[in-house]
Amino acid sequence: MAPHHLPFFITPPGETDFLMVATGIFLVVAVLWVGTLYWGLHSLPERMAHKSQKLQFEIVAILGLLALFTHIHLFWVAALLLAMIDLPDFSTPLRSIAGSVEKIADAAPDAAADIEPAPESTPAPAQAGSSASRSASTAKEEARSHV
């Protein structure tokens, strides 16, 4: 009683529906492809900031993770903008300054060794505030210690 001209996607009872199997395979492949595309787009700021400074890269990575787990897209936009901006290198000059200060600090005790040591006596509390009671050698030593 069935018509003789059925469309190709209607299968007889008990046989495999090839259209449904093909659609299922296509759906799985499409979901994996879109997931890979999304993951690649999501990691774009990290890949851009990979060549920058370590601190900038870490901040971009944290913003990317926050965007991934909280679904707040503003974090991803901030990470992308931070990855595109080249921050100036402040650490190298500061390290140079710190190294120079360490060299000066190491040289200061050698220069102070040439000066005769100050007397070990401590002034009375009433005389501690007067500048006239200080000796000239103590004043020179204080001036050198501040340099």
Image: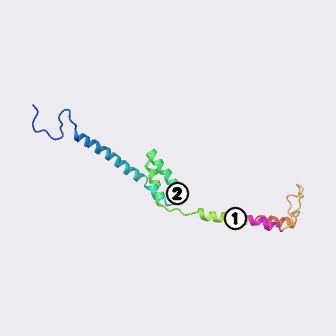
Cα separation, mark 2 vs mark 1, equals 27 Å
* Residue drawn at (72%, 66%) of the image: 104
Q: Are marks 2 and 1 in contact (CB under 8 Å)?
A: no
Considering the whole magenta stretch, tell me its main secondary structure. helix
For badge 2, the amino acid type reads: Gln
Which of the image's four quarters has the N terminus? top left
Q: Position of residue 83 (x, y in %)?
A: 47, 58
Q: Which residue is mark 2?
A: 56
Q: Position of residue 94 (x, y in %)?
A: 62, 63
Locate residue 42 relative to residue 17 in the image: left or right: right
Residue range highlighted in magenta: 106-114
Rendered view: 1 above or below 51: above
* Residue drawn at (13%, 38%) of the image: 6
Determine the image quadrant of residue 91. bottom right
Q: Which residue is mark 1?
A: 101
Residue 74 colored in magenta in the image: no
Viewer-side residue, 98 vs 50: 50
User: Do we see residue 9 in this rendering?
Assistant: yes
Label 2 crowd bin: few (<14), some (14–19), many (20+), radius 10 Å: many
Q: Position of residue 134 (x, y in %)?
A: 87, 63
Label 1 crowd bin: few (<14), some (14–19), many (20+), radius 10 Å: few
* Residue drawn at (35%, 47%) of the image: 32
Q: Position of residue 68 (x, y in %)?
A: 44, 47
Viewer-side residue, 54 vs 67: 54
For badge 1, the amino acid type reads: Val
Q: Earlier in the sequence, mark 2 or mark 1?
A: 2
Viewer-side residue, 63 vs 123: 63
